[in-house]
Amino acid sequence: MRFFLVYFFSCIFSADWLSTSGNKIVDSGGNQVKLQGLNWFGYETQMRVFHGLWAANLHDTVAEVARRGFNVFRCPFSADLLHEWSSGKYEPVQINPNVNADLNGKNNREIWDDFLVDCKKNGVKVFIDIHGVEPDQYQDATWGKPEYIYTALEWFANEFKSDDTIIGIDIKNEPHGQCDYADKAIWDSSTADNNWRSTAATAASRIHAKNPNLLIFVEGIECYNGPRGIESGWWGGVLTFVKDLPLDLGSHQDKLVYSPHEYGPTVFNQTWFNPTFTYDSIYNDHWKDSWMFIHEQDIAPLLFGEWGGKLEGTNTDWMTYMVQLISKNNLSHTFGVSIRTAETLKDF
């Protein structure tokens, strides 16, 4: 299987935290930082450690990622794992000692710490996302136990507050639900349990109480019923609500990054993938109103948290157009390289 890996020029970071200015992510000197990276799955699964360590050396992998021009990892976690770590429970893991001899006998937290050391050495940043409450659980439209998530996020923010290798938290993977679903993720001014706007604001506030330096990556929802009617798209991919009710992080507004997920026709044949779709047609039919207005109106930065797929058929066209969009607008992204993750393996 071939993967569509796009290599960009790498930004080597100085030892500082990142913030935002308009539609840009910036360092402490106000210089723009383009985050361009990869997802590395595993800690969100029953394995509780990076996938691929059965075949690839951890240290060589991080070094090679940096050499290829990537400067950030998005690492999915489960809330359960963070609670395990917060209580001092570290799971032994299975790795290939012939490939990772120095990791043999280490637990999953020790391997994570080794990974952070490698990232710092190679000038690569890291952020995590809460992929599910439990390992291998990715289907929750919203959080059924928000307090459980909040305390996990607080612990993580506090535990790593002295390490600027970790630049932020993507607070929930792919809020979703069609507009006619009872348990759908919504975006409004209420404090309903399924209101993603309220949940995101609360999570950000509690994270920043522990570490005010962290970026907060906020994904979209699947369906928004607003002043223009029903607008729908990918799980975590609809951000049209920003036109009406942008997220307010108060004194930490300069830490907000909107993070849509974007996929091609091999995942689902959305309406904008008509038989003759072009860059211009998909921009006008989907990208512009779903999230590009956020960039174009200088509201906040965008980072595509997941995107990618197979090089086949019209999916190749879509991926080519995505590369053009990212390059033309200097947008940040973390490509969805999939080794074994159950939720997207069929799409890669």
Image (cartoon, grey):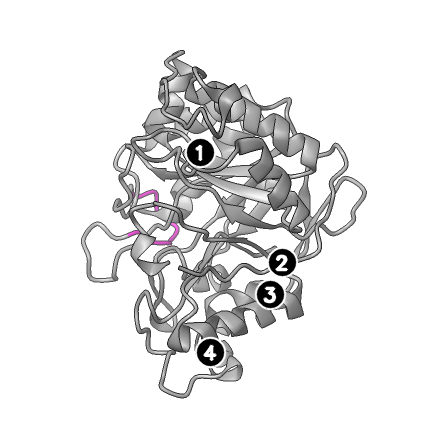
Query: In which quadrant of the rendered image does the N terminus lie?
Result: bottom left
Query: What label does residue 7 carry, if any?
Result: 2
Q: Which residues are magenta?
A: 185-192
Q: Residues within 10 Å of mark 3 (few under 14, many from 20)?
A: some
Q: Quadrant of residue 221?
A: bottom left
Q: Please report whichever mark, 1 or 4, sits nearer to the chain's N-terminal start.
A: 1
Residue 132 appears at what percent x and percent y?
A: 32, 38
Category of crowding for the residue at label 2, using alpha-carbon neighbours closer than 10 angstroms: few (below 14), some (14–19), many (at least 20):
few
Residue occupying the point 47% across, 77% down: 317
Q: Which residue is mark 1?
A: 53
Report the residue marked by disc 4.
Answer: 282
> Is 229 positioned to the left or the right of 16 in the image?
left
Badge 1: few (under 14), some or many (20 or more) residues near its Cα, within 10 Å?
Answer: some
- Spatial distance from mark 4 to mark 2, Cα to Cα? 23 Å
Q: Are marks 1 and 4 in contact (CB under 8 Å)?
A: no
- Which residue is depicted at the point 56% across and 29% down? 115
Circle 1: element type = loop
Q: Which quarter of the image is occupied by the C terminus?
A: bottom left
